[in-house]
Image (cartoon, rainbow, N blue to C red):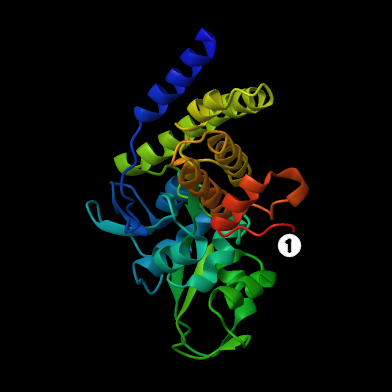
Amino acid sequence: MTHTSTTLAAGLVATLLAITSSPARADEPDVMIYKVKPGDTLDLVAAELYGDHAQVILLVAANKLVKPRPLRPGEKLRVPRNREYVTQPGDKLSALATVLLGDERRAWLLASLNKLDETAPLPAGTVLQIPLHIPHVPAGPEPLASIAQQYLGDARSAELIKRYNALDHDLVDKGEALEIPLTTVRVRKLPPLDADSQLRRDKADANERAVGIALPQAQRAWRDGDFDLVRKLLAPIDLDFIDPPSAIAAAVLRGKAELAFDDPDAVKRATEAFKAAIERGALPLRAFDASPKVRAAWTGAGGPIDGK
């Protein structure tokens, strides 16, 4: 192994060890408190916080006002807000939808809002946008189209409300509580990420940078037959914090490199690497691309071969 390669591997280790993971906080409130200033009106507060005075309806609903009214200086208003959540290892959209949106069946909205594949593994350190939502309880029978027009400005968004609330009807009854997700409304300035979330975000950034450097180097080392360098380059990468294609490529290559050695734990390390690849969605191994030793470790990790 060259001096440059040794330095590169050591540098990647140092970069990644400098950032540690921390437990997630998923219990942030969906509202913030605004203290009314002299001269404030509900319209002005809506314009200041949402950039649109028409969103006064959100303040009226959140504060259970019958209609807009004058504000008193020092009065505290509940302000519905969107928020951000930074994923941690093992997070899945369905479980996050339960915690963050109250129903696992709402995972589709998290996927759509964040441009994610609902079924794909979710890298740790991903910043998810959590939509602002507002409760609505009809005073009498009310069409979903009317509710959509009122809150979303488009009667055609009735289908979004219908799906979000798992309804099978288009006319809601008096007292039938709904939650309205406002995917296009944002509080203009969110508070910074808490320390735990920022650490996860930083760790994801560090691992993404590291794998971008290490993986091409490891692939070249593999072609050159330098299997020890492959292991050293890829060992510091935390697969939980990188995108699935990179994680799969790194895990498979590392597993193959482990099997180039005859020490007693080589197969165990290779199997663990292959398991990581399979968990991130690796396709079946093509038999003609792998040695019998690799195929045995792959199947030992629970991976299929050529669709078998």
* Closer-to-camera residue (266/161): 266
Give the quadrant of the C terminus.
bottom right
Q: Is residue 172 left or right of residue 159?
A: left
Q: Outermost residue toward the left?
A: 74
At a point 36% along the width and 37% down the height, the residue shown is 199
Q: Outermost residue toward the right?
A: 288
* Closer-to-camera residue (241/226): 226
Q: Can residue 194 be seen in the rendering of this structure?
A: no
**Residue kind at label 1, given as amino acid type:** Gly
Q: Is residue 143 above or below residue 34?
A: below
At a point 54% along the width and 90% down the height, the residue shown is 141
Q: Is residue 86 left or right of residue 260?
A: left
Q: Is residue 102 above or below residue 17?
A: below
Crowd class of label 1 (few under 14; some 14 to 19; many from 20; radius 10 Å): few
* Closer-to-camera residue (42/86): 86
Residue 175 locus on image (x, y percent): 44, 88
Q: How many marks?
A: 1
Please name the residue that numbered disc 1 is placed on: 307
